[in-house]
Amino acid sequence: MMLLEMAAGGFADRVAVGTRDDGLTFAELFERSGAIAGRLRSVDAGHLVLADVSSEALPALLFGASWAGIPFVPLNYRLADAELRTLASRASPALAVAEPGAAGRLDGIDGVETVDRAVLWAELAAAASADHDWSFDGEDVALLLFTSGTTGDPKAAVLRQRHLISYILGSVEFGSAGEEEAALVSVPPYHVAGIAAVLSNAFAGRRLLQLPTFEPGAWIDLVRDEGVTSAMVVPTMLARIVEHLDAEGPSSPGLPTLRALSYGGGRMPQPVVERALELLHDTRFVNAYGLTETSSTVALLGPDEHRAAVASDDPAVRRRLASAGRPLPGIEVSIRDEVGAEAPVGATGDIWLRGGQVSGEYRGQGSRLTDDGWFPTNDGGWLDDEGYLFVTGRIDDVIVKGGQNISPGEIEGVLLRHPAVADAAAIGLPDHEWGERIVVAVATHAGAEASAEELCTLVRRELRSNRTPDHVEFVDDLPYGDTGKLLRRVLREQLAHLGDA
Amino acid sequence: MAELTPGSRWASQVCTTEVIVVRSPGDDVDLECGGSTMVPPGEGGPNGSPDATASEGSQLGKRYVDDDDTLEILCTKPGEGSLGVGGTLLGLKEAKPLPASD
């Protein structure tokens, strides 16, 4: 709330969210947040649950929960009813805000009162604001985000006010955006980046625009129509935007207003970034790496580093295009081996993080931080001699063949450089002799061809021979979750027949 | 004198200024505004007016640092008093924004 109060004090009449012509100003956003807080208090809600797409109501709901001093709990509205209801019941007692027309999905859950967002929003316009008596306790829980575990029930990551404040104060300058700036957000509210975008753009004084359902044509239209100056996308979105711009041909007007484009939330095929850099030569690219448990971004590869990497003949500099850049000023990174000892520069290990924005806490399970504040991310990676962080992927995804640990990411990176390969994933499947065998699933571009032999030879040449795939399976496409994460578990199930029983 | 933990908030006793601590040396620090010691919000003031030697004012959203750059505070509500530590005024910190990542 402190962030919104500052924004409303600093630039009350700027549009905070929506179109230039009929968006909500920061003063109006402040009023609506107060009205939501009043409503939450009147029903003694313990949580504010959201089962809805991004909308103009999102910032007011997020700040209103904070004003009322209760956690904001955005759920994945794409889940099946049964799963959605299970998660909502875990946040009981709650007021749940549902996508217009879909309130029935959450009916009849003990302790959960459901309201249609459109109905709520209309009522709030005339409602009185709550008293200006919000809590400033940094220990208050601001946000509960369910993370998709590979097994068992989803865990609820806990982010407290102090984590989010630390992230914003550590990475954003107050009022640093020009009056004409607008940020386009197309990640959903249940993704940590969707929430971080609301906070950091409000603090910067930047107008927020939302695209609830991503579609590359609609995204490009919105950038052009609303003069969008910055945007955040996940890798699959960027790939589709690049395809769409390419299809516009030489007469494409490009995206001249787009000064900054940040991407993150999954592995990014290098050819996509390289093509995007060519097509959008005036846009400044940022690659951000972060986790739900770390209040979003912890490391980033900045615009100048992107251009320097692309322009360099030095392979060590050039490969930084595939890195997550360097840690934010308030973040420490440590690469550890299996016993928790610090690994030397260049060696791959587990990524551990420390800093004011790092939570590492799950509801009902306590904190995973060590006594001295370090969080083991369960991501593998390494640092180069200038401190650039390379993320190799989830440790659980590592293929163990004949006692050797093999990162799927490095095999995929090589395959994706083949001109015929549109997408590729490497997984380990059971093998009686080796423990696991390397199986790669490859999708080729329409009309393009590559033989399994050719791809295996490529990997053998670029990497060590023990990285060579044992089997290449050609597929139409790979399974992705709706925030752009490759679903390796699903792929392993689909290709289970290629492993030993 | 008080220990300024990061995230703690302080209010002026002589004007409307409020701040939050971003970075702190960890020792006890006498944080002042308008020449008077700052207190937790709601615990005193504002009464009177800033001392003439500390009345340039504080600016919303600006960061202030001490000479050693060990203390950094952010102004969350502006006022008429200047911010200082132990009788010395704090300087405005040059903004070096990171590229926006979300």
Image: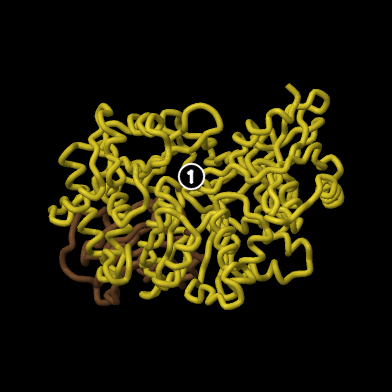
In the picture, residue A427 is in which quadrant? top right
Residue at 58%, 56% in the rendered image:
A327
Residue B19 shows in the view = yes
- In front of the other: A13 or A222: A222
Residue B6 shows in the view = no
- In front of the other: A286 or A109: A109
Q: Where is the N terminus of chain A found, in terms of image quarters?
A: bottom left
Residue at 20%, 58% in the rendered image:
A31
Q: Is residue A255 left or right of residue A315?
A: left
Q: Where is the C terminus of chain A found, in terms of image quarters?
A: top right
- In front of the other: A352 or A402: A402
The chain displayed brown equals B
Amino acid tagged 1 = Thr
Q: How many marks?
A: 1
Q: What residue is disc 1 on?
A: A292
The chain displayed yellow equals A
In the picture, residue A15 is in which quadrant? bottom left
- In front of the other: A62 or A107: A107
As displayed, is residue A482 above or below residue A171? above
Category of crowding for the residue at label 1, using alpha-carbon neighbours closer than 10 angstroms: few (below 14), some (14–19), many (at least 20)? many
Q: Is residue A4 left or right of residue A276?
A: left
Residue A239: x percent and y percent? 59, 58
Residue A374: x percent and y percent? 55, 41
What colour scheme does the image use?
by chain
Residue at 38%, 62% in the rendered image:
A209
Residue A360: x percent and y percent? 49, 39
Indicate the chain on which mark 1 is placed.
A
Point out the residue furthest to the top here: A501
- Could you say whether the residue bearing mark 1 is in a helix, strand or loop? helix
Residue A416: x percent and y percent? 72, 53
